[in-house]
Amino acid sequence: MLAPVVRVTRDADAVTTCALGFFARTGKAGVAAVDTSGALLGTWDIVLMPPETERFVYHNAELMPRSKADAWVREATRAATKQTAQSVRALVKEIDADVTQAAVVGKTLELPGPLDKILASHTLLHTSEGVLYRAAIADALHKVKIEWSLVTPDALTALQPELVGFGKVAPPFRREHKDAALAALSLVRGGGRGHGPRTARAGSTRRSR
């Protein structure tokens, strides 16, 4: 399930490879594609959680009896993982270029502690929501064999002037699309491929393996 927000029409012969950038929100993400010349190919909104499932997973768990919270987090995480995989697969098929690498904006894919600790802190609830969806994106990229990197928000600060190089972009071109585009551009400028743990799952406990 994806909704193209902006689509830039370019000469297909000139487009060979591109990098994707992802900026996760709770239950959705802004995505941008940047080609090897640094040109913006397009931006999209994709869905990371099925509409019938509560997207604020840890906030919802906080409201539950503790005996039900673990099972809810596991179930919701599976739903997000499945939906995100479907959305990323559909997006990659839609793009008129070979996607060689991707950037996920964020600081970590590690949950800040066990579920009891998370549920006791409003700040950690927000942190955990972000980890859940970033990890789902990383898993989805792994499934379609696209190497990925985490790009921290701080790393995008120096790239802000590069936004003018994209030219006039038809609205909406919100913050998440801009940051996703800059994250993708950072990979293109770096000339390297993405890297990261080959699997990334977030649940009541977070593991990389």
Image (cartoon, rainbow, N blue to C red):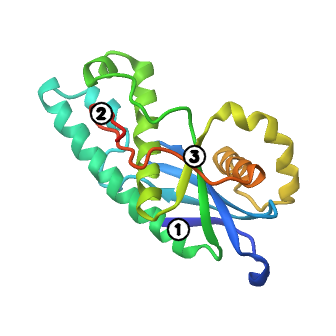
Mark positioned earlier in the residue sequence (3 or 1): 1
| Nearest the eye: 58 or 192 | 192
42 left or right, relative to 144: right
**CB atoms of marks 3 and 2 within 8 Å:** no
90 left or right, relative to 74: right
Q: Give the residue type that dot 3 points to.
A: Ser
Mark positioned earlier in the residue sequence (2 or 1): 2
- Residue 197 position in % (x across, y down): 45, 44
- Residue 155 position in % (x across, y down): 71, 35
- Checking the image for residue 78, the label placed there is none
Mark 2 Cα shell of 10 Å, populated few (<14), some (14-19), many (≥20) = some
**CB atoms of marks 2 and 1 within 8 Å:** no
Q: CA distance from mark 3 to mark 2?
A: 29 Å
The residue that mark 3 highlights is: 149
Q: Give the residue type that dot 2 points to.
A: Asn
Mark positioned earlier in the residue sequence (3 or 2): 2
The residue that mark 2 highlights is: 60
**CB atoms of marks 3 and 1 within 8 Å:** no
- Residue 207 position in % (x across, y down): 33, 36
| Nearest the eye: 52 or 143 | 143
The residue that mark 1 highlights is: 91
Asked which secondary structure carries label 3, the reply is strand
Q: Give the residue type that dot 1 points to.
A: Leu
Mark 1 Cα shell of 10 Å, populated few (<14), some (14-19), many (≥20) = some
Mark 3 Cα shell of 10 Å, populated few (<14), some (14-19), many (≥20) = many
Asked which secondary structure carries label 2, the reply is helix
Quadrant for the N terminus, please: bottom left
Residue situated furthest left in the rendering: 67
| Nearest the eye: 50 or 209 | 209
Residue found 74% across the figure and 58% down from its top: 171
